Image: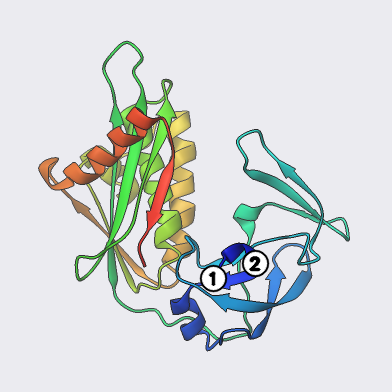
Amino acid sequence: MSIGDDLAVMQPRIAEALEIGEGQTVEFEILGTGESIFAPVTINDSICSDVLLHDFFALGIAESVTISFGGNVDEIVTKSGNKFSTEKQEMWAGLRLVQKKGTICLYFNGSKRSNIEGSAGHGFCIISEDGKELVRGYGYGGVNCDDHEMEYSGLIDGLHWAGRLDAIKLIIRGDSELTLNELKGVSQVRSPKLRTLHAEVKKLLKKIKKDAVVEFEQLSRDENVYTDRLANLGIDTKQNLTACNW
């Protein structure tokens, strides 16, 4: 089956939780625009998101789409003139809720090379309570970031994905005592750049805490070596990558 032929694709676990069957027509609301569309759903576990709306023109949503040089969709203008970005999309399917259950662990890290270029990168992974890797990712921070900033970047990426999993408990694990103390309010965040990143983390945590308990755990560097390797992959490849396995 080709995903390109299907306008609305959904992960099996989401379809099951919402009691949506193959081919069933579902209403999708575009939050912030007051608009909604109806589309038949194809159930497929090969997509790297919970729900994929594949073609905004064929769905009758878009009047125009602005795409950046890197191929990312920056802005979509609907036929009624409303504007939104793909990062702000969420799915609405009546009042039925996905059941929250289980514990997930989010590991995060940041790395800064001490060579002349001084490149930086971040990494994260999310593990289920039975030890299964659900998501892993890494990113490149360029040469103007330090490892502290990269730790926050790795955590932010990880929290975006953790918030999409149906857990009732999230354990955040890192090897930076300073970063964890800042998150727990024990230490103050002094750098203006870090304060911006810290505020983003707190915003994501506030949303997650509506449905889940959040805890922090300090690790040794040896216990967090996997995410260190991921952060260095970000530096070596100069790319941002996320792999899902659920």
Q: Quadrant of the N terminus?
A: bottom right
91 or 52: nearer the viewer: 52
Residue 120 vs 89, above or below: the answer is above
Image location of residue 228, percent across then percent down: 23, 39
Looking at the image, do the residues carrying marks 1 and 2 touch, with CB atoms under 8 Å apart?
Answer: yes
Amino acid at dot 2: Asp
Q: Name the residue carrying label 1.
A: 1
Which residue is outermost to the top? 116
Give the residue type at disc 1.
Met
Q: How many marks?
A: 2
Q: Is residue 92 left or right of residue 230?
A: right
- Give residue 5's mark: 2
Question: Which corner quadrant of the image does residue 121 belong to?
Answer: top left
| Residue 165 in sight | yes
Mark 2 surroundings: few (<14), some (14-19) or many (≥20) residues within 10 A = few
User: Element at badge 1?
Assistant: loop
In front here: 69 or 194? 69
- Is the residue marked by circle 1 packed among few (<14), some (14-19), or many (20+) residues within 10 Å? few
Q: CA distance from mark 1 to mark 2?
A: 8 Å
Regarding mark 2 in the picture, which secondary structure is present there? helix
